[in-house]
């Protein structure tokens, strides 16, 4: 190997796919520095995403920026300050061994291939921002000598070696279709420690968004360490049509051992395509398509971003899968955001959890971002499936407060809406719904979900008025498939139903709320729990109501009437049939000073009871209804009888 720095190693590595007419060509050259700038590679197909075949009648998806972020623009690093300068183009390079399906070939095979030689270059400065790594030297610039573009079969292998510390080989390839590149690296047993080899994958692109590529950005990095001896190191990377370069260089130690670099390419495979590590560099996640991805185990901040399109309101569910891995650590964080960057959903996927599901997440029409962020460095593949259903009868996140509450239209039929409590990495979700009554009347609602087979509290449901005053509260357990409110009299106006799981066992199971409204003037109007808020009652006219509960607190209802002249009065209290026995209600009559004039109990087993006769002077009087020793929210009626 006399004067190795004056030789050019030419090797061929590629996979020619027969799927969708994809073309994959691979060539190997030696890196050189400080050479005049040469012509740029063929212009790359504009980096975009394959749109889901859906008619969209709204704004276009958020535009991707053409400028790479700092991580994308980081360039290959080497472990030595000295990088050999390649010889002139006229010098002849020895042939690197190129094996396909066990047969040995050389890069010189085929005169036709030699005639297709072309001049390729890496035009942009290659610099790194990974300052935390030790023993690494920046390759400021590297140019490529004349190289041969050859078409070879799939699973091609190229065997080569690095001549010295700081040596580097570059392998160029192009593809005309989107797909998955799988890189393999194999070497024999060697006595060493540290990282003898580092592999970089670069993509050619136009820094200013022009037609011709004029820069290179780093897509991924693969470190080959001593622990990988006698194994094949692989990594899958989704790529778009365009020009690429694989750089093999030394790490923090040098090894003269031969290595075998392998590559396979599958066209049109549903796989993430780098760079997709920011909200402006994303892949579209098509509905119902199981899409693969991986997080680089050597790029600490390799996050994968996906765009989800909702052409109309509805809901999505996200299934995240990976092989079961050792340890109990969190492997990934999944975060769903809206276009304003607000977090809708955040979930952990532990290394030992082979499958994690989001549950159904209600969304309005628009575009949303799903971020897959590795928590620990590992290169396991993952798969995401995003199912989507379009419907107007589902909640729309974010709806955590009265100001962002979803509307439940009120009509003369049952009004329905469904939702689920989205996970937010330990922070309970809250869903708020708003409805407006056009007139006085009575409402009732049911809360439904499937049986989850455990007697644990799962949801808290609260009814509030426009002022935020709590009118009714109940809890639904995991085993309660249906929880019904009592009939609740309300005046015309706006009200809210809020659902949360505070201090309860979290579940992302879907629930459904059915709201029924009947207009009428003969019902109480909550909140009427003080004399000042008493509902008027006319002599001889029955007034209906219910005692509702708010947690451990029970309701009190007040009614008021006036006496114009001294009169004898009785009160009649009636209620629907109620099972059981005991004191269900206590009815009191008081004057304006609060002095109780008469009081009696209504038993659960007694449908109607009338008070003793009371003589009343002219003035204003109040009827107070309280819960007895056996609380009931059954419908009751109260009547003032003048004798």
Image (cartoon, helix red, strand yellow):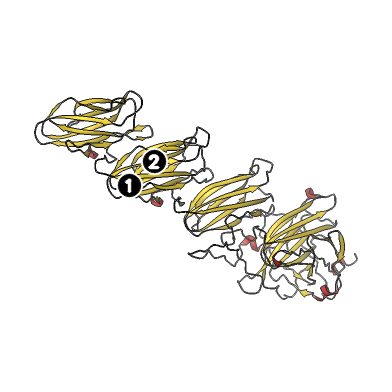
Q: Secondary structure at mark 1?
A: loop
Can you tell which mark lies on residue 462? 2
**Image quadrant where residue 219 sits:** bottom right
Picture residue at 74% right of the left edge, 75% below the top: 36
Between the residue at mark 2 and the residue at mark 1, the CA separation in whole angstroms equals: 13 Å
Q: Secondary structure at mark 2?
A: strand
Picture residue at 56% right of the left edge, 52% below the top: 387
Can you tell which mark lies on residue 466? 1
Q: Is residue 311 above or below residue 607?
A: below
- Tell which of 321 and 62 is nearer to you: 321
Q: Residues within 10 Å of mark 1 (few under 14, many from 20)?
A: few
Q: Quadrant of the N terminus?
A: bottom right
- Tell which of 379 and 479 is nearer to you: 479
Q: Residue furthest left?
A: 565
Q: Is residue 193 left or right of residue 405?
A: right
Q: Residues within 10 Å of mark 2 (few under 14, many from 20)?
A: some
Q: Is residue 336 left or right of residue 562?
A: right
Q: Residue furthest top?
A: 582
Q: Where in the figure is residue 343, as x and y percent of width and height?
A: 51, 52
Picture residue at 47% right of the left edge, 54% below the top: 391
Q: Where in the figure is residue 202, as x and y percent of width and height?
A: 70, 64
Tell me, yes or no, if residue 39 can be seen here. Answer: yes
Tell me, yes or no, if residue 140 can be seen here. Answer: no
Please report contact status of discs 2 and 1: CB closer than 8 Å, yes or no. Answer: no
Q: Where in the figure is residue 406, as x and y percent of width and height?
A: 41, 51
**Image quadrant where residue 527 sits:** top left
């Amino acid at each position: 190997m006399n004067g190795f720095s004056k030789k050019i190693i030419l090797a061929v590595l590629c996979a020619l796919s027969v799927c969708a007419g994809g073309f994959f060509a691979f060539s190997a050259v030696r890196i050189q520095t400080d050479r005049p700038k040469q012509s740029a590679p063929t212009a790359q197909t504009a980096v975009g995403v394959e749109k889901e075949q859906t008619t969209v009648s709204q704004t276009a998806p958020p535009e991707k920026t053409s400028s790479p972020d700092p991580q994308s623009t980081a360039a290959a690093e080497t472990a030595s300050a000295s990088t050999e300068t390649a010889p002139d183009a006229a010098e002849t390079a020895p042939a690197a061994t190129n094996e396909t399906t066990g047969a040995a070939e050389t890069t010189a095979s085929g005169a036709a291939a030699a005639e297709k030689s072309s001049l390729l270059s890496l035009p942009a400065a290659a610099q790194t921002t990974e300052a935390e790594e030790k023993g690494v030297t920046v390759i400021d610039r590297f140019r490529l000598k004349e190289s041969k573009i050859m078409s070879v079969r799939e699973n091609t292998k190229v065997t080569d070696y690095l001549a010295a510390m700081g040596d580097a080989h570059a392998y160029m390839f192009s593809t005309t279709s989107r797909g998955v590149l799988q890189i393999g690296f194999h070497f024999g047993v060697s006595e060493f420690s540290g990282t003898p080899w580092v592999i970089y994958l670069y993509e050619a692109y136009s820094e200013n968004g022009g037609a011709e590529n004029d820069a290179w950005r780093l897509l991924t990095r693969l470190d080959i360490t001593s622990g990988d001896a006698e194994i094949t190191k692989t990594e899958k990377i989704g790529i778009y049509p365009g020009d690429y370069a694989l750089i093999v260089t030394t790490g923090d130690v040098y090894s003269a051992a031969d290595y075998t670099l392998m590559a396979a390419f599958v066209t049109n495979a549903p796989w993430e395509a780098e760079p997709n590590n920011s909200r402006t560099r994303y892949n579209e996640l098509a509905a119902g398509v199981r899409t693969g991805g991986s997080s680089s185990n050597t790029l600490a901040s390799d996050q994968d971003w996906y765009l989800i399109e909702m052409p109309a309101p509805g809901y999505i569910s996200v299934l995240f899968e990976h092989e079961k891995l050792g340890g109990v650590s969190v492997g990934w964080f999944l975060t769903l955001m809206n276009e304003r960057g607000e977090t809708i959903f955040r979930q952990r996927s532990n290394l030992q959890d082979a499958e994690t599901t989001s549950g159904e997440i209600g969304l309005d029409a628009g575009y949303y971002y799903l971020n897959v962020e590795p928590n620990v460095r590992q290169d396991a593949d993952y798969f995401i499936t995003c199912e989507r259903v379009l419907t107007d009868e589902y909640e729309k996140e974010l709806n955590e407060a009265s100001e962002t509450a979803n509307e439940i239209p009120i009509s003369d039929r049952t009004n329905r809406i469904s939702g689920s409590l989205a996970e937010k990495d330990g922070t309970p979700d809250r869903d708020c719904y708003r409805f407006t009554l056009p007139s006085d009347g009575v409402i009732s609602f049911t809360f439904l979900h499937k049986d989850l087979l455990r007697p644990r509290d799962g949801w808290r449901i609260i009814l509030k008025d426009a002022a935020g005053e709590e009118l009714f509260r109940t809890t639904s357990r995991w085993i309660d498939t249906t929880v019904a409110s009592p009939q609740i009299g309300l005046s015309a106006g706006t009200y809210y139903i809020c659902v949360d799981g505070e201090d309860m066992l979290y579940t992302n199971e879907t629930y459904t709320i059915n709201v029924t409204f009947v207009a009428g003037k003969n019902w109480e109007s909550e909140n009427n729990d003080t004399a000042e808020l008493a509902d008027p009652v006319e002599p001889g006219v029955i007034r209906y109501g219910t005692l509702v509960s708010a947690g451990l607190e029970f309701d009190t209802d007040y009614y008021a009437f006036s006496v114009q002249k001294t009169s004898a009065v009785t009160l009649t209290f009636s209620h629907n049939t109620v099972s059981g026995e005991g004191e269900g209600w206590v009815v009191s009559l008081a004057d304006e000073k609060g002095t109780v004039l008469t009081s009696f109990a209504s038993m659960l087993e007694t449908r109607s009871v009338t008070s003793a006769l009371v003589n009343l002077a002219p003035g204003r009087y109040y009827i107070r209804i309280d819960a007895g020793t056996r609380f009931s929210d059954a419908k009751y009626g109260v009547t003032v009888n003048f004798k």
